[in-house]
Amino acid sequence: MAFPTAVNNQITDAVTQSNVKVVAEAPAMAMGSLYQTMAHSTGILFQNAVSSQQQQNTLSQAAANQGVMQVYTLDTTAAAGATEKVAQTGVSDNLTSLLTILNALNPPSTSAI
């Protein structure tokens, strides 16, 4: 000791050693606390990622359901008529009409070719 005191030397040594122990353990305790905080934050990160994936899955199922509902609510006769109109470009009908008119204007000859 640097100077003599009225307190027993063993008591001052015990207090000094416990202070040194606390100061020496402080960095390890701080790192432990930091690791626990990081682990907790990473856990919350993964929980949020799973929740987001579940919400995206629900939205995609809802969108697919809406699409199927729209397909099933179409009037089938109107849809068939619209499909036929889209599929027919009218070329064959126009060619048939043109051939009929040409045949009417110029009757086929009876002579053999």
Image: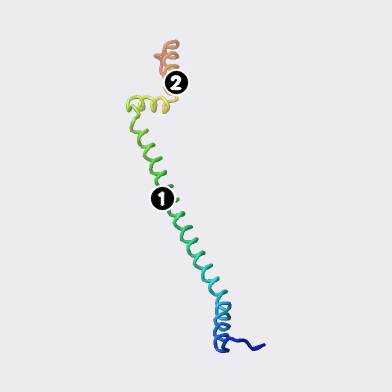
Image quadrant in which you'd find residue 60: top left
Q: Position of residue 75 (x, y in %)?
A: 33, 27
Residue type at mark 2 is Leu
Between 24 and 91, the one nearer to me in the picture: 24
Q: Residue at x 51, y 71 (%)?
A: 32
Q: Residue at x 42, y 23 (%)?
A: 92
Q: Residue furthest right?
A: 2
Q: CA distance from mark 1 to mark 2?
A: 58 Å
Characterize the local packing of mark 1: few (<14), some (14-19) or many (20 or more) Cα atoms within 10 angstroms. Answer: few
Vertical relation: 108 (above or below) 57: above
Between 31 and 83, the one nearer to me in the picture: 31
Q: Position of residue 35 (x, y in %)?
A: 51, 68
Numbered badge on residue 54: 1
**SS type, badge 2:** helix
Q: Position of residue 57 (x, y in %)?
A: 41, 48
Q: Residue at x 39, y 25 (%)?
A: 82
The residue carrying mark 2 is 95
